[in-house]
Image (spheres, rainbow, N blue to C red):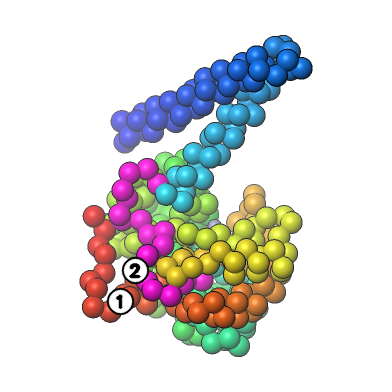
Amino acid sequence: MLIDLFVRGLIMMIFVSGSVVISYYTTRVFAFLIPVAKISELFLWSGTVVISAGLLMGIAYYYVYHGFGLQTDIIRRKPSAGNKVVLTFDDGPSEVYTPDVLKVLAEKGARATFFMVGSHVEKYPEIAKKVIEEGHEVGNHTYGHITVPNSPPPQLAAQIMRTNLVILQITGIYPQYLRPPRGLYDMRMRRIAKLLGQELVLWSLSSQDWHSRANKASITRRVVERAAGGDIILFHDSGSLLNSEGANRKPTVEALGPIIDGLRAKGLEITTMQEFMDYPPEQTRRLSS
Ligand SMILES: [Zn+2]
């Protein structure tokens, strides 16, 4: 455990110091090339901070969407899924928005996968049950919407196992899929998922409905324009930037109907994770390596 922590700390330090050094010299080159920008201490350091932040955000983005190395155990999209796409909803269930999302899905005859926060399932058991009763799938999104790489080992395992149990007790279903909050996973989580017989699912297309300026039109346009067969599309039916719930998800609810219509008009078929992974039927399901 200590070695694990040490290695992770070391990798983090290499990333941070590497980007600081790169940013510092990039700023120096800028100051040299642009005569207006005089090499003052302030210019150098503010340039370094801005470029470092950009680099680190870029690395984080790359990590979530592509990962480092092969990582065949992590499902982001499925190129062999033909015209199928999956709609996924994170952070629920919410007393306010999940029933509205279910209503739209029922009207459109579409099924979805809900990655639920364990503590929210305990808080709103009736809504969690309704999700299953209406033919949708439920996945595990940890008990308290934790940041996985920061959490101590016993807490991480407990967060995942407790959520599996809560979902099983309330809905009668053992969640087959696991999604780390904010897409931040680590080696330990991959091992736990394998041990518990679950698959780690991220996403290939974010609706960016968490954005403070997101609205019905922006969410609809983004998803319908970008979606292609094999995509796993991310929405939120609860959550917020700082807390695990409380954000306004009205734009998501409003955009959902037009999105389903738009995806179907593009010839895409909406399925659940399970159907998606089992397609094409003759292909054996990919097992965690
Ligand atoms: Zn989340």
- Residue at the (62%, 83%) spot, across then down: 103
7 up-or-down from 211: above or below:
above
Foreground pick, 97 / 144: 97
Q: Specify the amino acid type for callout 2.
A: Ser
Foreground pick, 271 / 168: 271
Query: Quarter holding the N terminus?
Result: top left
State the residue position of label 2.
80
Residue 239, horizontal then vertical, whole percent: 62, 59
State the residue position of label 1.
280
Asked if one can make out residue 45 in the rendered structure from this viewpoint, the answer is: no
> Is the Cβ of the residue at disc 1 closer than 8 Å to that at disc 2?
yes
- Picture quadrant where residue 81 is located: bottom left
Q: Is residue 2 magenta?
A: no
Asked if one can make out residue 65 in the rendered structure from this viewpoint, the answer is: yes
- Residue at the (72%, 55%) spot, across then down: 212
Q: Specify the amino acid type for callout 1.
A: Pro
Foreground pick, 9 / 2: 9
Q: What is the crowding at mark 2: few (fewer than 14 residues within 10 Å), some, or many (at least 20)?
A: some
Label 1, label 2: how far apart the Cα atoms are: 8 Å
Q: Which contiguous range is marked in magenta?
A: 67-87
Residue 74, horizontal then vertical, whole percent: 36, 56
- Residue at the (59%, 70%) spot, across then down: 224
Query: Quarter holding the C terminus?
Result: bottom left
Q: What is the crowding at mark 1: few (fewer than 14 residues within 10 Å), some, or many (at least 20)?
A: few
- Ligand 1 quadrant? bottom right
Residue occupying the far right of the picture: 36
Look at the numbered disc 2 and give the secondary structure of its residue. Answer: loop
Look at the numbered disc 1 and give the secondary structure of its residue. Answer: loop
38 up-or-down from 19: above or below:
above
Residue 227, horizontal then vertical, whole percent: 53, 67
Taking the image as shown, residue 75 lies to the left or right of residue 50, namely: left
